[in-house]
Image: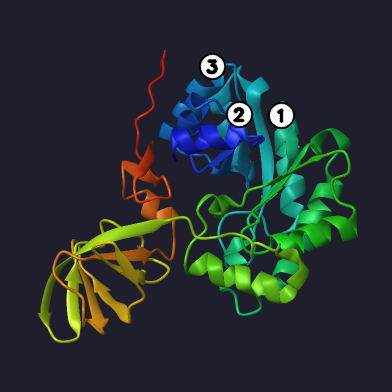
Amino acid sequence: MSPEIFRAQLAEGAWGMTVADPQQAMVAADAGAKNILIANEVVDAGNLDVLRGLLARGSVEVFVCVDSVAGVQRLAHASGSNISGLHLLIEIGVPGGRCGIRTDGEAKDIAAACAAQGLSPAGVEGYEGILSYADDGREAFEAYFDLLSRVWRDLPEEGRKILSVGGSAYYDLIVNRLRRDHIAPGGLIVMRPGCYVTHDGGMYRSLFEEMRHRHPDIIGADGGLHDAMYLVTTVLSVPEQGLCVADMGRRAVGYDQGLPWVDCHWSGDMAREVDLTVRELNDQHCILTGDCGGVAVGDRLVMRAHHPCTTFDKWRALPVSDGAGGIDSWVTTRFGTRPEFDRA
């Protein structure tokens, strides 16, 4: 949700931007995106109102997920005469997971509802990343992709325009299935591995290692993706032996996938590895335990986050390093921004 990062991605050839709701879609459109994929259902009145304002611009193509007949009907009613820029993607889900259909029959019902509303499905969409939490992740992935493949093949030819999947945890398996099953010839495959922008030092790194284990040849000579997000904190206090406190808390870093970890201790111009572990985060403080010898008040600790997505949304602006200890530029974020458009 950073206009500067959106523009950088588009300049490098990105097909479009993926967002979670119409408000975010407005931000992407303002940054220059012409193709916007809302990887979610849009059903409530407020979001439908924003979507209608976005479609009224006439300069963007908006792809929205649907997993029910009711969802199709609400979108058709809200879009009114602006359906030319609206494209519906049938979302594929997994049992016990999030949104998305679970059966072939539901896909047929959605296709029929689209026809009744003068719409046509533009393809299918799925997010397999949620399967990384399942005990039988590989088996569940194959079942998920079997359903995705069947729904895609059952669509009329004019409805097989876009096939979109995630790509952060299982993109090796996705590519293999696309090749093996000869899926989407003539259609556009849109992968959405959002984590590639920064990667991380925890969750995605472990998923990357699993991918490396499955396919050792998939990682290039440079080792693949590298963590690009650092949090520089200051030691506020060393109140007792084996314990120090830094000025970073829950309001500064995402912790939903695990606590941050210490990359190095920085004192003056010297950086060194240090045996410190984050014990807990308070709102404004980070409590660390371990070898505090040589750690003094005012020193810096460089941290890594386990989940970049929920770290970005803590900040209105983030500095981009110049690689030499200085700041090259800034990127801003637009979470919670109220979109401005003519409601008339």
Determine whether the residue tagged by mark 2 lies in a helix, strand or loop: helix
Say above or below: 310 vs 62. Answer: below
| Rendered residue at 73%/59% (across/down) | 103
Residue 246 occupies which quadrant of the picture? bottom left
Q: Where's residue 11, x and y in %?
A: 60, 31
Quick one: quadrant of the C terminus?
top left
Q: Nearer the viewer, residue 208 or 178?
A: 208
Quick one: quadrant of the N terminus?
top left
Q: Nearer the viewer, residue 214 or 217?
A: 217
**Label 3 vs 1, first from the N-terminus:** 3
Disc 1 designates what residue? 119
Circle 3 Cα neighbour tier, 10 Å, few/some/many (<14 / 14–19 / ≥20): few
Distance between the alpha carbons at the discs numbered 3 and 1: 19 Å
Disc 2 designates what residue? 76
Residue 64 occupies which quadrant of the picture? top right
Q: Is residue 344 left or right of residue 197?
A: left
Outermost residue, front side: 269
Determine whether the residue tagged by mark 3 lies in a helix, strand or loop: loop
Say above or below: 220 vs 88. Answer: below
The numbered disc on residue 57 is 3
